């Protein structure tokens, strides 16, 4: 872990009006409020509610001996429930904004038992209970196609479903995209240690960023926000990098070669979900490598929108394996990008050079 991983920024009040309760209200932002103040506040509250819902299911899953790892139903129920909750709250406050969500209600419409569980779960965190039909409708409110013009939200109700099922990391990821640029990002990470150096310490954290206003971290149950920033490390051989737990999502072999080329000796931090972006943004790791395994896979916008703005606002850099900025303006996927490389910024050029060398070598080996 880098030196910065151990340093903690001092908590400071954030420049937004805070709410004394977690109840959502349609109140107008203060006239002096910073840009996107209402979007920021509503997104945080929506992510808190969805995170609370997921955390409840997750705790039962982790403690229940009766649930086998192959039983995907807990994550399915929490996934649908979280999407219904976030979509419902966003639509109530921003009725003009469409949503690009990961899930649709097709499977749920065919399974009454699961549907009833989703309805019960979603209503457990909503102020006003919704009917079964309203829940299905809220889930399908996430079917927007995205694109270059205007505003839309993008949501991954549970990013890292495999991590959730393993009892490890997952995230509720929400972002606002306007004219193709991510403006607001909120990541709820219910199982992430608040300090990576203290895995036995308190867990559950939220990362928040608004374009031009910095990145912040807070816990699920306190409004106190701490400004976060990426590590100041400049000697690339002293860095640590993170990558997916799932070898099918990112090439771990090529990541190891890149690390070797850069002289990195620390073991990689393997972690599911966009928690990786949060960990990098607060300086607990210095590089995030997502190296394509499949030549045809298109990354999804909900898997990167929230995380990428949090890194950028914490002072880091994000691009694809070719150095291109991630393009959130062309629909539900990042089809003009391949993979993702993120870093604290100061080591970015060195990392990109090593990425190019290793990927070029792999390409040559494949064509021989
Ligand atoms: N072949 C592939 N390459 C890269 N990412 C993939 C992939 N198949 C699935 N994914 C995405 O990887 C995400 C998890 O990322 P990570 O490995 O960083 O935890 C999944 O999100 P969900 O868990 O929301 O489905 C899924 O969208
Ligand atoms: Mg995902």
Image (cartoon, helix red, strand yellow):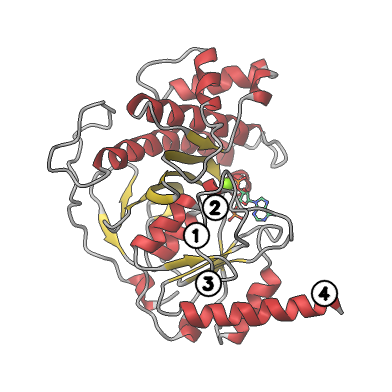
Q: Residue furthest front?
A: 149
Q: Which residue is mark 4?
A: 366
Q: Which residue is mark 1?
A: 276
Residue 90 in the figure: left or right of residue 155: left
Residue 356 in the figure: left or right of residue 86: right
Q: Secondary structure at mark 1?
A: helix
Q: Residue furthest left?
A: 32
Residue count near mark 1 (Cα–Cα under 10 Å), binned few <14, some 14–19, many ≥20: many
Residue plotted at (58% across, 53% down):
334
Q: Find out if the beta carbon at label 2 lies less than 8 Å from the nearest ligand 1 atom.
A: yes
**Residue 349: x percent and y percent?**
49, 80
Disc 4, disc 3: CB below 8 Å? no
- The dot on residue 241 is 3
- Cα–Cα gap, marks 4 and 3: 26 Å
Q: Which residue is mark 2?
A: 273
Residue plotted at (57% across, 55% down):
272
């Amino acid at each position: 872990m880098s030196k910065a991983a151990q340093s903690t920024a001092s908590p400071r009040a954030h420049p937004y009006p805070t709410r004394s309760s977690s109840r959502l209200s349609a109140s107008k932002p203060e006239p002096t409020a910073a840009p996107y103040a209402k979007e920021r506040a509503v997104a945080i509250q929506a992510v808190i509610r969805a995170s609370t819902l997921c955390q409840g299911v997750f705790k039962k899953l982790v403690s229940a001996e009766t649930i086998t790892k192959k039983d995907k139903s807990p994550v399915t129920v929490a996934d649908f429930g979280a999407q219904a909750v976030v979509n419902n709250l966003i639509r109530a406050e921003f009725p003009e904004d469409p949503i690009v969500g990961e899930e649709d209600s097709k499977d749920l419409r065919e399974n009454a038992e699961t549907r009833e569980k989703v309805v019960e779960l979603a209503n457990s965190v909503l102020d006003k209970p919704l009917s079964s039909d309203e829940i299905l409708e809220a889930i399908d409110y996430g079917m927007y196609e995205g694109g270059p013009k205007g505003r839309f939200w993008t949501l991954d109700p549970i990013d890292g479903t495999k991590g959730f099922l393993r009892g490890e990391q997952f995230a509720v990821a929400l972002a606002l995209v306007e004219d193709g640029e991510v403006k607001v990002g909120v990541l709820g990470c219910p199982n992430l240690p608040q300090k990576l150096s203290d895995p036995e310490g308190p867990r559950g954290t939220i990362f928040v960023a608004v374009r031009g206003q910095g990145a912040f971290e807070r816990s699920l149950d306190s409004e106190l926000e701490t400004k976060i920033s990426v590590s100041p490390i400049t000697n690339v051989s002293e860095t640590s990098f993170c990558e997916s737990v799932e070898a099918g999502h990112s090439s771990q072999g090529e990541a190891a070669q890149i690390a070797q080329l850069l002289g990195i000796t620390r073991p990689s931090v393997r972690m599911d979900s966009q928690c990786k972006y949060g960990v990098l943004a607060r300086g607990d790791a210095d590089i995030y490598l997502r190296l394509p395994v499949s030549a045809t896979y298109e990354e999804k916008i909900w898997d990167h929108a929230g995380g990428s703005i949090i890194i950028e606002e914490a002072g880091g850099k994000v691009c694809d394996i070719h150095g291109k900025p991630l393009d959130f303006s062309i629909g539900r996927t990042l089809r003009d990008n391949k993979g993702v490389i993120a870093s604290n910024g100061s080591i970015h050029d060195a990392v990109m050079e090593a990425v190019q060398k290793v990927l070029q070598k792999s390409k040559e080996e494949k064509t021989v």
